[in-house]
Image (cartoon, rainbow, N blue to C red):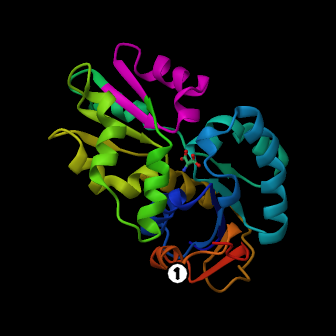
Amino acid sequence: MTGHALIFDSGVGGLSVTAEIRKLLPALQQTYIADDEFRPYGEKTDKQLRTRLPGLLWILCEAVRPDFVVIACNTASTSALTGIREALSIPVIGVVPAIKPAAQMSLSGRFAVLGTPGTVRRKYVDQLIADFAPDHDVILQGSTRLVALAEDKLAGRPVDIAAIKAQIAPIFEGGPVDTVVLACTHFPLLREELIRAAPDGVRFIDSGEAIARRVKTVLAEFTDLAPCEVEVDRALLLGPDAAPARRSAFQNFGFTRVVGLLPDAR
Ligand code: DGL
């Protein structure tokens, strides 16, 4: 199935989503946009995200002309999705934290939601817990440091397991937790490190595959997809140009052309 998707995140996090979409829909053209200048989204207020994102996505869609948009970011999806949908006339797919599958999988009845500080304090997450895990003990843990560590990893910088351990330690303080929902798209990029840092047997789950399935359904609903004029998958970084290692990270995820909006000031 062809078609052209605009994939949006604050940084490299959405790459964990594009990887799942590629597995399911290898012929789909993808244009990736990273809002580097405004990261971390998890430290921004609802109001800041709701003010910035609808207009920004409108401008980006005018320029990129995708068939649909994937907001590959939990923080943006849980705060600004309604406004983004209102601003655009094409389908917009958001990320829903994998709370429902976690509730079904958790044998101990205690699981954690690990997201950005913004995501874990959203009413939307409280509602998902009330709807799908009312009888579970759910630990909410926010971390901005993990977002930075995922960015470091993909920029070729070493990632310290002790730093990851410190970020997730509070989850395991009050008793055994068997499942951790990765409610930030940056975090699956640290999956191996998280497994090493966590107690044995803890399972980490995310929404990547579910989003890919949703993309397939949305794509199947199109009756008149125009042929895509773009020949290669591109990544546009709304910030300083990428360091070579970060550029190759995007290339390794299939984005042949990587363009930074501003000259690299570093
Ligand atoms: N990747 C994003 C998310 O899924 C946000 C990271 C950030 O900018 O704080 O929440």
Judging by the rendered image, the residue that carries numbered circle 1 is 244
Q: Could you say whether the residue bearing mark 1 is in a helix, strand or loop?
A: helix
Q: Amino acid at mark 1?
A: Pro
Give the quadrant of residue 113. top left
Estimate the x, y position of residue 161 in percent, counting from the top left: 28, 52
**Pick the front one: 124 or 172:** 172
Q: Residue at x 61, y 46 (%)?
A: 94
Estimate the x, y position of residue 199 in percent, counting from the top left: 18, 38
Residue bounds of the magenta highlight: 111-140
Q: Is residue 1 left or right of residue 175?
A: right
Give the quadrant of residue 265. bottom right
**Pick the front one: 178 or 150:** 150
Give the quadrant of residue 224. bottom right
Please indicate, yes or no, whether residue 185 appears anywhere in the rendered image.
no
Estimate the x, y position of residue 54 in percent, counting from the top left: 80, 47
Q: Is residue 187 left or right of residue 107?
A: right
Q: Is residue 171 left or right of residue 84?
A: left
Quadrant for the N terminus in the image: bottom right
Q: Residue at x 37, y 21 (%)?
A: 138
Q: Is residue 80 left or right of residue 251?
A: right
